[in-house]
């Protein structure tokens, strides 16, 4: 390699290869991705986030929430569990049988065998598919995160480190802004040993007017402002809460199947 | 033209002003970056104190600290060293110094604009790509200008030889505009949809943080190690092999295990991370065989020491990447502090310390003034080494501990954060040592810049007071 031009060509070739693999390839595969059908349902997933939540994503971005929180639930695999839906005519025999059987953490074949045994004594069963893994066991999600979860997000905030818990499914864990807002204002008021810094700048402490503001936070005594004052979320805080509420990756998809516990839930 | 036109002294002197601008700004950002990193890490020790203003929040401080280190220090320092090595190896004076000076100012301005953007909440939202468009456009054009000038100087070199350092440095020179424009166009200009954004951001992050620094740092080390040890690089063909394998395996990775993307991407990344063992071993052998038994191999805490330390840090940093390519270890350490430890080892332990060595060697020669506090150089080296070792060891061990706790669903999440606290205290101590090192480094650089400005002022003053006659100048 005596010539600068040769190096240029060589480096160029390698970079084209890398670019083709990590930019062009994914773009061809996913760049035109569309909504996908939800398993066993006529609905499609994902829906665009509502306007407030989309604005909240920008608050999430601006404050670098992804520096501490991931949005990537992991799963080890899937297992089957057998659930009794009706004991049938001979409940005593069924319950005797159930006490001897292992009902969860089964493979498909094992589940089928267990189901056959129970049906043989007259019980009716359903076989459920459940995701397994530490994150699932923690209740951080019902299944692992997939590309579809982020279809309409810009920017996509996957994060890389769990200084705080995973948020991919936080909207299902904390389904209410009145649970989220105090956590943003004073994390320790909700979780005693939370390590999260408070985001007081997203809130306003103001004098209570003629009547208390309907938005005012309901805080425990030690975190509440002085008497006659109330803590009211600024629009950013409301947007952020709306975004967090919109984070629920809880429908079964072709590449992440599971049996939802409430069958009618979209 | 006189015979003396391209003497070593002349070549060094021709780089003076561009290097002072590049390195001076870099030293400033280095200090700023470590102050920000320290402030960010204080969040863990007193989270309640950081809630009242938006720019004091961890999510802005930490990315700003990272960017100040990478864009503020590493890249301009690397480019300055590259310009000087090109001039030295080509035995040619740096031409068009004015353009490089302008480009260097533009670069530092771009970093400033970007940093302000991060603090006011205009971050793009991807790791290593936080700078909003104004800042990134300035960076791109400044780099283009500097890169083109470096290449012009390279192609106009008197000594037509091509050395292994050349390959690594030229590849680094090409790499940045390519990845930076791709990432900014596809993430900011015309954003792609969904997780493709994340994939591109990871690809960019790896190519910049790992590959660019590896190419530029190893290229510089391959120049300085033979020079200091008084032996030729061992050997041309080893270096050729290392160059190719590093370029191929180093560029085809970046997507972490378990990411919500098509499975072939993390698999391909992990495979190439594993293959990194090949260039790393080749580079280690080159370094070892070049330095071992060298006649002049005495370092005494000076530039040679730093470049040797940086070299070892590079091997270790790349070995950490190889280690987490193994699926079990990868799953255990993902989402933990392990990643931050590896990044810091790469950027500070390897690249920044290599650059310290190079700058300490280059600047006195280019400026023609010795450092004001030569003894502090040794102190600085010890602080930097101590700081990075404390930081990396505590966060690697802490990361594994945190990973074990995260993998066990019976351990409450809050316990995994609590268990990290002692390790974070240690890493904050490491940051303190690095801050001290950076301050000492900046002190020597700034005093030199001041001394140089003073001497220029004196010359101008003397010229105004008593201009030399033409005959005197000739003599």
Image (spheres, helix red, strand yellow):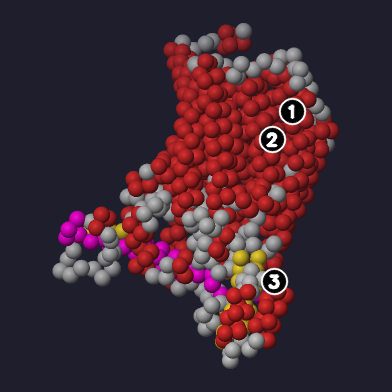
Q: Is residue B115 inside the magenta stretch?
A: no
Q: Position of residue B398 (x, y in %)?
A: 54, 42
In the picture, the disc for residue B471 is none
In this rendering, the answer to whether A216 lies above or below B125 is below
Q: Earlier in the sequence, mark 2 or mark 1?
A: 1
Q: Is residue B442 visible?
A: no
Q: Are marks 2 and 1 in contact (CB under 8 Å)?
A: yes
Residue behind mark 1: B287
B290 vs A190, left or right, is right
Depth check: B386 or B25 in front? B386
- At 62% across and 43% down in the image, what residue appears? B209
Q: Is residue A28 visible?
A: yes
Q: Position of residue B282 (x, y in %)?
A: 78, 35
In the picture, the disc for residue A107 is 3
| Mark 1 chain | B
Q: Are marks 3 and 2 in contact (CB under 8 Å)?
A: no
Give the magenta-colored segment's residue range.
A226-255
- At 75% across and 34% down in the image, what residue appears? B283
Q: Position of residue B42 (x, y in %)?
A: 41, 41
In this rendering, the answer to whether B350 lies above or below A227 is above
Depth check: B228 or B330 in front? B330
In this rendering, the answer to whether B411 lies above or below A40 is above
3 and 2 marks on the same chain: no
SS at circle 3: loop
Q: Position of residue B294 (x, y in %)?
A: 75, 17
Residue behind mark 2: B315
SS at circle 1: helix
């Amino acid at each position: 390699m005596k010539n600068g031009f040769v190096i240029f060509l060589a480096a160029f070739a390698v970079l084209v290869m890398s670019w083709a693999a990590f930019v062009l390839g994914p773009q061809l595969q996913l760049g035109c991705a569309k909504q996908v059908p939800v398993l066993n349902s006529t609905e499609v997933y994902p829906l665009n986030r509502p306007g407030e939540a989309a604005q909240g994503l920008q608050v999430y971005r601006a404050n670098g929430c992804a520096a501490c929180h991931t949005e990537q639930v992991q799963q080890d695999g899937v297992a089957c569990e057998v659930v009794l839906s009706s004991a049938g005519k001979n409940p005593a025999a069924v319950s005797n049988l159930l006490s001897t059987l292992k009902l969860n953490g089964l493979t498909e074949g094992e589940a089928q065998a267990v189901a056959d045994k129970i049906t043989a004594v007259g019980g009716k069963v359903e076989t459920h598919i459940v995701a397994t893994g530490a994150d699932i066991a923690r209740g951080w999600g019902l299944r692992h995160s997939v590309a579809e979860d982020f279809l309409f997000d810009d920017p996509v905030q996957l994060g890389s480190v769990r200084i705080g818990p995973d948020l991919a499914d936080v909207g299902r864990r904390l389904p209410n802004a009145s649970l989220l807002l105090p956590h943003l204002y004073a994390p320790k008021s909700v979780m005693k040993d939370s390590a999260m810094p408070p985001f007081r700048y997203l809130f306003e402490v103001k004098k209570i007017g003629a009547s208390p503001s309907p938005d005012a936070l309901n805080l425990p005594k030690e975190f509440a402002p002085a008497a006659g004052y109330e803590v009211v979320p600024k629009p950013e805080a409301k947007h952020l809460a709306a975004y967090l509420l919109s984070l629920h990756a809880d429908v079964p998809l072709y590449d992440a199947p599971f049996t939802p516990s409430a069958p009618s839930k979209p | 033209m006189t015979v003396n036109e391209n003497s070593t002294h002349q070549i060094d002197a021709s780089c003076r002003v561009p290097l002072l601008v590049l390195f001076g700004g870099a030293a400033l950002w280095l200090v700023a970056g470590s102050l920000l990193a320290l402030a960010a890490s204080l969040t863990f020790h007193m989270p309640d104190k950081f809630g009242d203003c938006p720019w004091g929040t961890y999510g802005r401080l930490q990315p700003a600290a990272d960017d100040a280190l990478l864009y503020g220090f590493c890249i301009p320092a690397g480019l300055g060293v590259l310009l000087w090595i090109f001039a030295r190896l080509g035995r040619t004076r740096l031409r068009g110094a004015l353009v490089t000076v302008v480009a260097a100012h533009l670069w530092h301005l771009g970093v400033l604009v970007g940093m302000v953007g991060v603090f006011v909440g205009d971050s793009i939202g991807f790791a290593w790509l936080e700078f909003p468009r104004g800042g990134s456009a300035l960076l791109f054009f400044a780099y283009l200008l500097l890169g083109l000038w470096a290449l012009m100087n390279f192609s106009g070199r008197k000594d037509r030889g091509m050395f292994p350092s050349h390959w690594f440095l030229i590849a680094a020179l090409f790499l940045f505009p390519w990845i930076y424009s791709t990432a900014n166009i596809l993430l900011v200009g015309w954003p792609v949809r969904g997780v493709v954004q994340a994939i591109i951001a990871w690809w960019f992050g790896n190519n910049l943080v790992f590959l660019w620094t590896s190419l530029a740092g190893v290229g510089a080390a391959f120049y300085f190690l033979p020079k200091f040890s008084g032996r030729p690089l061992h050997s041309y063909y080893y270096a050729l092999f290392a160059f190719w394998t590093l370029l191929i395996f180093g560029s085809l990775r970046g997507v972490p295990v378990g990411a919500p993307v098509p499975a072939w991407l993390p698999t391909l990344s992990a495979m190439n991370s594993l293959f990194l063992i090949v260039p790393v071993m080749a580079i280690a052998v080159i370094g070892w065989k070049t330095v071992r038994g060298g006649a002049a191999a005495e370092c005494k805490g000076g530039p040679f020491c730093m470049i040797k330390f940086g070299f070892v840090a590079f091997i270790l940093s790349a070995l950490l990447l190889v280690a987490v390519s193994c699926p079990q270890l990868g799953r255990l350490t993902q989402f933990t502090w392990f990643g931050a430890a590896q990044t810091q080892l790469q950027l500070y332990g390897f690249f920044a310390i290599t650059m310290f060595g190079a700058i300490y060697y280059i600047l006195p020669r280019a400026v023609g003034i010795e450092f004001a506090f030569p003894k502090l150089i040794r102190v600085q080296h010890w602080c930097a080494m101590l700081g990075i070792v404390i930081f990396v060891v505590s966060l690697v061990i802490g990361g594994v501990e945190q990973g074990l706790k995260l993998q066990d669903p019976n351990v409450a999440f809050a316990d995994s954060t609590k268990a990290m606290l002692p390790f974070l205290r240690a890493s904050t101590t490491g940051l303190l040592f690095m801050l001290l090192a950076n301050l000492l480094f900046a002190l020597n650089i700034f005093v030199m810049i001041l001394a140089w400005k003073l001497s220029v002022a004196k010359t101008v003053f003397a010229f105004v007071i008593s201009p030399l006659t033409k005959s005197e100048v000739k003599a």
